[in-house]
Amino acid sequence: MARGNTWRNWGRNQGCSPAAVELPASELEVVEAVGRARAAGQTVKVVGAGHSFTDIACTDGRLLHLDRLDRVVSVDRDARSATVEGGIPLWKLNEELAQRGLALPNLGDIDRQSIAGAISTATHGGGIRFGGLAAFVIGLELVTADGQLLRCSADEEPEVFSCARVSLGALGVITKVTLQCEPAFRLHSIEKPRTLDSLVHDLDDIVDANEHIDCYWFPHTDVATVKVANRTDAPVRVKSGWKRWRDETLLPNYAFGALCAVGRRRPDRVPANMQLVAGGIGRTELVDVSHRVLCSRRLVRFVEMEYSIPRADLTKALLQVRDFIEAERLRIDFPIELRVAAADDIPLSTAHGRETGYLAVHLSSGTPPSAIERYFRGVETIMNELEGRPHWGKLHFQDASTLAPRYRAWDRFQAVRSRLDPDGRFRNAYLDRVLGSPV
């Protein structure tokens, strides 16, 4: 959200006052905006939907909104690929691909982000057979610090391409993305509650037996939920309009949001609220097009921290977080999410070089900062012992000195950054912290 020269993110926990705000509508206008920043001695940062919880998009220089760069540029039906502008939001991309009989192989559970922002922060879905969204990228165009338009792929500027798929906005302004798609497909989804102990015992089997998974544990309860989804040729089968609105909007958003508001005023009520939420969970089964199954509507604002760890450590991490919450008598008003992803070869991907488990913790927006920090720092301590890598767009307390040893290709990324942005045109406080100053 931007008003004048004041910007705030979706979670309402980050904000900045740029010296200038621009909304380019073409690559040429992006080139010109970077040129104006260079002439004025300003840094440049890019924002899409503002769905990161870190200050990755904040700047006191020139802020570029990519909202107007939101078109599907071309589709190659034979190659099953699509080239899109960097600012297109995932929800629009999904609909545009579906109209052309295509789909992305996997998605996260939120579809508000821009494609450029999603890949740049290593956004991912759930399923051990799939990498994150950046793994589906087969070509990029970006405007570099010197105002040049650079095209890259596995065949053209391959080292830039390798690094730019998860770039944190440090290498340039991503104006176009070419994605490897698949023929549109339907998913048969089943979501049901189970005990925490059974989730811990069965998680490996659940992961191996299903294409897509998404699991939650509700703190202060023994209730977990497991959502699995697999491809099917069965016809679409969804709930009626009222039931769908009740189960996807009323209960998980408006009712849950009201309980969170009560819990922020009365933290002693949080355990009972979570028991109430968990007790109302039933079994849900449907068949629908892939993006409608994988993505959910999120109206309750929150802040989040997510860590990637070796897949084998995922249940151990969950139990340690549970024990930490109980030992510290914390009051946690949001469920903890578990997902998995395949290993990839992208230098700053959180899944680089290993099958990955993801554990995400949340608190509702408006929770006192001291409570957020106490919870998140405690969880981060557990993740540090498990070679944890933080999601680049979600809260964490790491810096370049702690992160570099966790990425085997760290120096490769830094070499590309030094080549493309030697003067730090795309730097900000967040990148200085997590990547260090450009060399």
Image: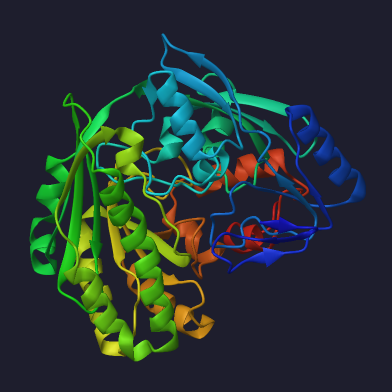
- Scheme of colours in the image: rainbow
Q: Nearer the viewer, residue 413 or 88?
A: 88
Residue at the image position 46 percent from the left and 67 percent from the top: 302
Q: Can you name the residue that lies furthest to the front here?
A: 242
In the figure, residue 225 lies in which quadrant?
Answer: bottom left
In the figure, residue 236 lies in which quadrant?
Answer: top left
- Above or below, 270 against 36 in this view is below
Q: Position of residue 8 (x, y in %)?
A: 65, 62
Q: Is residue 41 visible?
A: yes
Count of residue discs: 0
Q: Position of residue 130 (x, y in %)?
A: 30, 37
Q: Position of residue 415 (x, y in %)?
A: 62, 42
In the figure, residue 50 lies in which quadrant?
Answer: bottom right
Residue at the image position 30 percent from the left and 61 percent from the top: 337
Q: Is residue 181 visible?
A: no
Residue at the image position 63 percent from the left and 61 percent from the top: 430
Residue at the image position 36 percent from the left and 45 percent from the top: 295
- Above or below, 75 against 59 in this view is above
Quarter of the image with the N terminus is bottom right
Q: Can you name the residue that lies furthest to the right here?
A: 39
Q: Position of residue 66 (x, y in %)?
A: 67, 40
**For residue 283, side relative to residue 437 (left or right):** left
- Above or below, 11 against 357 in this view is below
